[in-house]
Image (cartoon, rainbow, N blue to C red):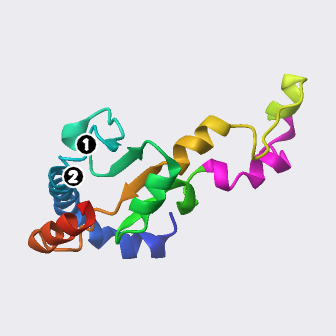
Amino acid sequence: MPELSAAVLRPQLAGLRAQIARRRRHRDIMLSALSDRIGRDLQPVPHHDPANAAGLALAFATPEAATEFGARRGVHRLIDTGRHVYTNWRSLQARNPLHPGFDPYAANGTEIDHGPGACPRTLEILARTCVVDLAPELPTPAFRLLASRTAG
């Protein structure tokens, strides 16, 4: 990390634990607000350590249901965020290895399809999954109100 970036980020470390704690509280609040819908029309994406989860993703039965829910404030469909390899796979398609001696495309000896149709099931899951912004900058009472409005 460049020194200038470190100088800016280092003071922020002091508040990191509080921010993570607030995210966890907000996650619990949102799950509570959605409790009557869980198992019916949405399901929290499984987390390997729920007690320490600081994020929340919700899976819906259909992309249309995710689109409707994703239109709410602080909610985004995963496929629309651009934060996954399947919407930004130019580097895979260009096949530019870091070093010619470590070229996984040449080592395989077969043609690998990295085009948009290569992972249809993954794209389908992304299209019906929403991520909820847990807004650690909001005070908990304000987030409770937001959660009740988001849950609908």
- In the displayed structure, 118 sits above or below 68; it is above
Q: Which residue lies under the disc numbered 1?
A: 38
Region of the chain picked out in magenta, as a range: 85-101
Residue at image point 63% right, 49% down: 85
Residue 115 is inside the magenta segment: no
Quick one: which residue is furthest to the left in this view?
A: 141
Q: Could you tell me which secondary element the residue under label 2 belongs to?
A: loop
Q: Which residue lies under the disc numbered 2?
A: 34
Q: Amino acid at mark 2?
A: Leu
- In the displayed structure, 27 sits above or below 40; it is below
Residue 98 is inside the magenta segment: yes
Judge by depth and name the residue closer to the eye, 102 or 1: 102
Residue at image point 54% right, 57% down: 83
Tell me where residue 127 appears, x and y as whole percent.
54, 50
Residue at image point 61% right, 44% down: 123
Q: Is residue 123 left or right of residue 143?
A: right
**Mark 1 and mark 2 residues within 8 Å of each other at the beta carbon:** yes
Residue at image point 23% right, 73% down: 137
Judge by depth and name the residue closer to the eye, 135 or 103: 135
Q: Is residue 30 left or right of residue 56?
A: left
Judge by depth and name the residue closer to the eye, 76 or 109: 76
